[in-house]
């Protein structure tokens, strides 16, 4: 059974650019959640996708957008990058949309915005 | 909105000593409660969770936590620390029926030989 994978591992962008991060969910999981983890902080919920539909969103602006594909893999897109977007971006997959379903996290993508 | 407080950004213990990591939440209605561990350069791993039923929850790696409604707490304990327990620990809380967990700021556990 393959776990949650994310690509790329590290990424460096400049302010104003756009970035796409990718996540492959664990086999059998239909839900993907994305989190932003700033240095020294806990993860902050960005949004969740359940069966290809956005199913909940945290306090993030619309320039954070996402997509879930029929195979339940997912993308996180961030437009007009700002310096404060520098963080570790984590995705987690689960077998259901509710928070009591165990989430399995990927290793994250470290984004640096210069 | 839920909030969660983890007391102490760093906790230092000797190998073999008791580990106690504190977590308090804000809701007046019992939420779902979680503890996660994060090793360097890795994602989070669920240690244990409380959703309903027995208030003492046993997790992986010898950790356990007790839900105390009167104290709005969910502290994590382990009787005897191992060097391999050194990591960042996060408490998370979620309203029942919600999709969205709220994480605390984390506690770094340091284990001395």
Image (tube, coloured by chain):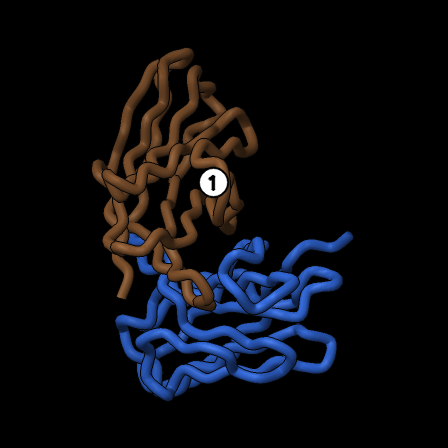
Chain colours: A blue, B brown
The secondary element bearing badge 1 is classed as: loop
Q: Residue at x 37, y 88 (%)?
A: A62
Image location of residue B110, percent across then percent down? 34, 27
The residue wearing badge 1 is B39
Q: Is residue B41 visible?
A: no
The quadrant holding residue B87 is: top left
Q: Residue at x 35, y 78 (%)?
A: A14
Q: Is residue A109 visible?
A: yes
Please rate how many residues cluster around mark 1, counting C-alpha atoms within 10 Å: few if below 14, some from 14 to 19, many from 20: some
The quadrant holding residue A95 is: bottom right
Residue A24 is left or right of residue B52, and the answer is: right
Q: Nearer the viewer, residue B74 or B47?
A: B74
Image location of residue B96, percent across then percent down? 43, 61
Q: Can you say which quadrant of the picture contains the C terminus of chain A?
A: bottom left
The quadrant holding residue B27 is: bottom left
Q: Nearer the viewer, residue B13 or B2?
A: B2
Q: Is residue A18 above or below residue B66?
A: below
Q: Is residue B111 above or below residue A85?
A: above
Q: Residue at x 43, y 85 (%)?
A: A18
Which subunit holds the residue at mark 1?
B
Q: Nearer the viewer, residue A97 or B6?
A: A97
Residue B98 is left or right of residue B2, and the answer is: right
Q: Is residue A72 above or below residue B100?
A: below
Q: Residue at x 48, y 68 (%)?
A: A34
Image location of residue A67, percent across then percent down? 57, 83
Q: Nearer the viewer, residue B50 or B39?
A: B50
Image location of residue B82, percent across then percent down? 47, 19
């Amino acid at each position: 059974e393959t776990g949650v994978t994310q690509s790329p591992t590290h990424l460096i962008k400049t302010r104003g650019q756009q970035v796409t991060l990718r996540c492959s969910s664990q086999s059998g999981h239909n839900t993907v959640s994305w989190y932003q983890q700033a240095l020294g902080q806990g993860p902050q919920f960005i949004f969740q996708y359940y069966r290809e539909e956005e199913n909940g969103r945290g306090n993030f602006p619309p320039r954070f957008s996402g997509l879930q594909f029929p195979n339940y893999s997912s993308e996180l897109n961030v437009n007009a990058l700002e310096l404060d977007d520098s963080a570790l971006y984590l995705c987690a997959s689960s077998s259901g949309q509710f928070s009591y379903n165990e989430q399995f996290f990927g290793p994250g993508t470290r984004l640096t915005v210069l | 909105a839920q909030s969660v407080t983890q007391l102490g950004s760093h906790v230092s213990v000797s190998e073999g000593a008791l580990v106690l990591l504190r977590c308090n939440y804000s809701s007046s209605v019992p939420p779902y409660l979680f503890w996660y561990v994060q090793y360097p350069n890795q994602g989070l791993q669920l240690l244990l969770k409380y959703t309903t039923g027995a208030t003492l929850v046993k997790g992986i790696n010898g950790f356990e936590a007790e839900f105390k409604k009167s104290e709005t707490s969910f502290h994590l304990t382990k009787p005897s620390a191992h060097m391999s327990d050194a990591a960042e620990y996060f408490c998370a809380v979620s309203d029942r029926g919600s999709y969205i967990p709220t994480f605390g700021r984390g506690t770094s556990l340091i284990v001395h030989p």
